[in-house]
Amino acid sequence: MILEYEYKYDVEDQEKTLYFGANEAGDAQGKVNGGYRVLLPDGRLMTVEYTVEGDSGFVPKISFESNANPFNGK
């Protein structure tokens, strides 16, 4: 039996320049969608979105945002 689930967390500490988080959700059929993001030391924001369904395994889509400022306006 497969149960549905969902989780999410975020860490945002401008003083220590920490910015990362993740989320994931799984359905009763076993499909999982999720992602995570992290502010890298070089100032880029790396985002990974992924799916897992059946025998496909972990299928990520990775992107980078240069000169990211996730604390803008906070």
Image (spheres, helix red, strand yellow):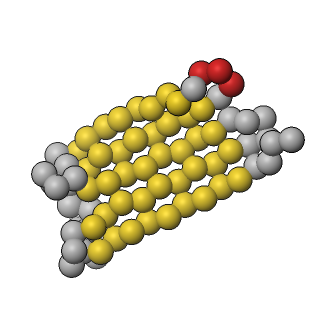
Q: Residue, x 31% and y 37% (percent of image)?
A: 63
27 relative to 17, above or below: above
Residue 69, position as x, y percentages in the image: 20, 61
Quarter of the image where one finds residue 18: bottom left
Residue 13, position as x, y percentages in the image: 29, 74
Q: Nearer the viewer, residue 65 or 39?
A: 39
Which residue of the protein is positioned furthest toward the bottom in this rendering? 15
53 relative to 40, above or below: above
Q: Residue, x 68% and y 44% (percent of image)?
A: 26
Which residue of the protein is positioned furthest toward the right in this rendering? 1
Q: Is residue 59 visible?
A: yes
23 relative to 17, above or below: above
Residue 10, position as x, y percentages in the image: 44, 66
Q: Residue, x 68% and y 25% (percent of image)?
A: 54
Q: Residue, x 56% and y 34% (percent of image)?
A: 51
Q: Is residue 56 left or right of residue 73?
A: right
Q: Is residue 21 left or right of residue 26?
A: left
44 relative to 49, above or below: below
The N terminus, quarter of image:
top right
Q: Is residue 61 left or right of residue 70?
A: right
Quarter of the image where one finds residue 31: top right
Q: Is residue 73 visible?
A: no
Which residue of the protein is positioned furthest toward the top in this rendering? 55
The C terminus, quarter of image:
bottom left
